[in-house]
Image (cartoon, grey):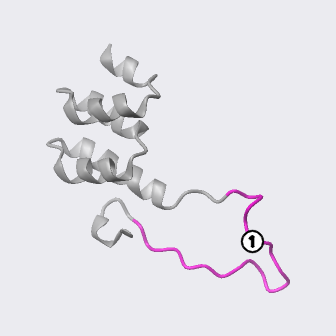
Amino acid sequence: MRLAAVERLTDQALLAKIAVEDKAWTVRRSAVERLTDQALLAKIAEEDKAWTVRRAAMVKLAYQAVKPIDQEAAAPVTEEGPPKTEAPELSPWNWRNWPK
C-alpha cells in the first residue's frame, strides 16, 4: 500500500524523507526513482544499505547528467553535418567516472 502511494507522490521533500527513512527497500527505491535532488541521490547511491536502492540512485544520477536535448534548442545542422560534441562515457556501473 505504501509503495502504491509513493508512486503517486510529487512532493520532493516527502519523497526525500521516504527515500532515506522508510524501512522497506522497495518503497525507498520507488521514492528514489522519483527524486530530482542530485546531492541526495549521490548520498543514497553511496550509503543506502540495499544495493537495489543504491543502483536506482546511480541510474537516476546518470540519466540526469545526460538529459535528452530539446530538439528546438539544439544547434542547427550545417552542410558539414551536426555540431561535434563529446559526451562522457557514463555508466551506472562505473560511477567514479561521472562528472562532479
The residue that appears at 80% across and 72% down in the rendered structure is 76
Side of 29 where 50 appears, left or right: left
Residue 9 percent location from the top left of the image:
44, 24
Q: Is residue 6 above or below residue 82?
A: above
Residue 75 percent location from the top left of the image:
74, 71
Q: Is residue 64 above or below residue 97?
A: above
Residue 38 percent location from the top left of the image:
38, 52
Residue at the far left in the pictured view: 49
Q: Is residue 86 magenta?
A: yes
The residue that appears at 34% across and 39% down in the rendered structure is 32
Side of 22 where 12 appears, left or right: right
Question: Callout 1: helix, strand or loop?
Answer: loop
Residue at the far right in the pictured view: 79
Side of 47 where 94 appears, left or right: right
Q: Quadrant of residue 95?
A: bottom left
Amino acid on which the number 1 mark rests in the picture? Ala
| Of the pair 37 and 88, the residue shown nearer to us | 37
The quadrant in which the N terminus is found is top left
For disc 1, the marked residue is 75
The residue that appears at 20% across and 54% down in the rendered structure is 46
The quadrant in which the C terminus is found is bottom left
Q: Is residue 75 magenta?
A: yes
- State the extent of the magenta-drawn residues as a range: 70-90
The residue that appears at 71% across and 79% down in the rendered structure is 83
Residue 50 percent location from the top left of the image:
18, 41
| Of the pair 45 and 14, the residue shown nearer to us | 14
Instruction: Kindly report the secondary structure that dominates the magenta region of the rendered protein.
Output: loop
Q: Quadrant of residue 3?
A: top left
Q: Is residue 16 above or below residue 84?
A: above
| Of the pair 66 and 40, the residue shown nearer to us | 40
Residue at the far top in the pictured view: 1
